[in-house]
Amino acid sequence: MRKVLRDMESRMNSRLFIGNVRHRRFTPVNHELNYSLFMPAIDLDELDALEKKVWGFGSHWWHWARFKRSDYIGEGCVKSAVQNKVEQLTGVRCTGKVIAVCHLRYLGLYFSPVNFYYVYSKEDEWKYLLAEVSNTPWNERHYYAIAADREDEEFGWEQDKAFHVSPFNPIDQRYRWKIKPLTDKLNVHLECHKGEKHFDATMAMKGKPLSSQSLLKCLIVTPIQTVKVMVGIYWHALKLWIKGAPFYSHPKFENSDEAESTDTVVDDKKNKHKENSAC
């Protein structure tokens, strides 16, 4: 039986990524944080199989690590919702697999600063990274579609910031993304610029099979990762406030006539981008 399970794991695209997230702030105050975390990378075609195979994982309220549909993009089939969003933003319809690198709902609690969806063509070529960004306490979502240009070794793109996330970062900044294909390693790097680099964030993780054993080990160490993430956000916000970092209010409270949030697509390194109304 164990051999059968190992064979199933080796054939599945889903993985469990374990690693670190680092944030660095360079101006007007210096600040750095580095914390460990784990995130499953779920081939959305394998959801049912994972629920049967991986203890503690599933879609029902009693699962320790719950994939609750309403926590993620759109409605209905998650895979279709991701593909629809990418098509809405880019005009390109991708019909291959979609791998969601996401936080789950642990013991009923959920918040994810960002989920990443790796979107592939029917020829199994990685085409886009769709970033689903959320903020707290407003609990809003915004989507960035980033094209995967394999001819660019640095995988670098730029775009204007279009969504309020941290009250210690102004909205009039420019993002610089560096992403790489999802293999047994995950690497995403984001910089915020306003003339000079103000802030960067790096996620570096290594993958292993998503199994009952690997997930349980992570859950024993961090039973409710949602709490760890939320406490970390507010603890470091307090530190920034004590250090005297400027505070920027949410734009919607500064301008009541402001239009609804827009989603952003990054086509290439030439800073081309277009915006569409959010769902």
Image (spheres, rainbow, N blue to C red):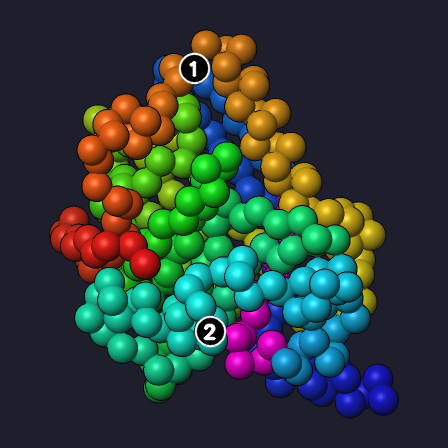
Residue bearing the label numbered 2: 76
Tell me the quarter of the picture where residue 138 sits. Answer: top left
Instruction: Tell me what residue is drawn at x 44 percent, y 68 percent.
Output: 75
Q: Amino acid at mark 2?
A: Gly
Which quadrant is home to the C terminus?
A: bottom left
Instruction: Tell me what residue is drawn at x 62 percent, y 85 percent.
Output: 11
Residue bearing the label numbered 1: 245
Q: Amino acid at mark 1?
A: Ala
Q: Position of residue 157 (x, y in %)?
A: 26, 51
Q: Which mark is residue 17?
A: none
Up/down of 170 relative to 191, above or below: above
Q: Position of residue 108 (x, y in %)?
A: 70, 53
The boundaries of the magenta stretch are 36-47
Number of numbered callouts drawn: 2
Relative depth, front residue between 5 and 47: 47
Magenta stretch secondary structure, dominant: strand
Q: Is residue 224 magenta?
A: no
Q: Is residue 151 visible?
A: no
